[in-house]
Amino acid sequence: MATLRQLEYLVAIVDEGSFTRAAERLNVTQPGLSHQFQALEREVGGPLLERLPRGVRLTPAGRSMVPHARAALAEAGRATLSARRAAGVSTGELHLATLYSISSGVLPAVMGLWRRRHPGVRVRLFEHRSADDLAQAMAAGVADVAVGPLPDRWEGTVRHLGTEEFVVVTAADDPLTGRGLAPRVRLADLADRAWVHFTPDSGLAQVLDSACAQSGFRPRIAVRTEQAASAVAYAAAGLGPALVPASSVPRHFPEAVLRPDPPVARVLAGYTRTGPDPVAASLLDLLEEHAALMPRHVARRLGLRQTSS
């Protein structure tokens, strides 16, 4: 059976692109590294890497094995941390995976509260562009906890956080704001506009394209950005309307905030691959209790009853 050390050597060789650099990174001799790697190849019954004049290339067997090797190493690290936490050692590192828009919107207030309760635990944040990227990273064992849309048929621990609504933001002098109507807008009424859009690989681009398609049009593009906060700024500057999570709208935002009619929303969850240790569970508890999916200042502007903190 392959050992964790052999899997660590495989991952290091792939990441560094050579046996020499991998040995230097791991502070082992190159002959020792090569010997262990050859033992791993004998264990799996074939070559995992092809040595090239400049670097290495994974074989099909290697490509199949590397994701599992990364997951095994990550799980071993978490097992050590979990044991330390269970023994009362309140130090270590929590790995948290999420989407860019959630990282800058929903998470900061919750993480501030969590940090005050666990001051000795470092947080390593992994930010992803789309829900698919996030789910793949969690399946590969990248993080202890994920916060985002729940993948289909997820078999690990799940805490449902609620529904996060999206809002349309525009400049204060936009013609939409002078109609004397409630702060609502039909996306179909914006079919002739050029939008502040998102980069094609962003999950927010998929949200906008899907919402507009359901309203019978394809959005024209004024500018593309990767971040919800940047989209808010560009919309405020008059480049066009932007569809963003409500949690992305800053306090004291001076421009227009409108609720799409019908609403656009996504269901969020906190989830883990396996049963969470006490520290990870405490984060899930706080998320369940304090995640502000519709911040008070946005709810007030939309004339909605506040349903979350």
Image (cartoon, rainbow, N blue to C red):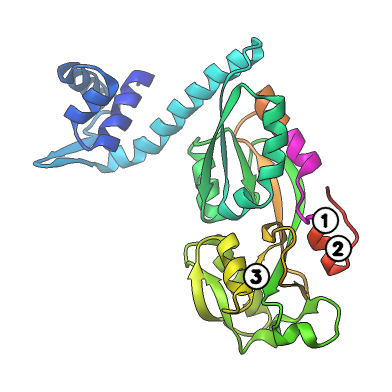
x, y percent for residue 63? 32, 42
Badge 1 amino acid = Arg
Q: Residue at x 39, y 31 (%)?
A: 69
In this picture, residue 200 sits left or right of residue 280: left
Q: Secondary structure at mark 3?
A: strand
Q: Disc 3 marks which residue?
A: 243
Taking 272 as reference, is 40 above or below it?
Answer: above
Badge 3 amino acid = Leu
Taking 214 as reference, is 289 above or below it?
Answer: above
Q: Disc 1 marks which residue?
A: 296
The quarter of the displayed image where residue 42 is located: top left
| 3D distance between C-alphas at marks 3 and 1 | 19 Å
Q: Secondary structure at mark 2?
A: helix
Along the viewing direction, whichever of 175 and 9 lies nearer the viewer: 175
Mark 2–mark 1 CB contact (< 8 Å): yes
Q: Residue at x 67, y 38 (%)?
A: 111
Crowd tier of the residue under label 1, counting other residues whose Cα lies within 10 Å: few below 14, some 14–19, many 20 or above = some
Q: Disc 2 marks which residue?
A: 300
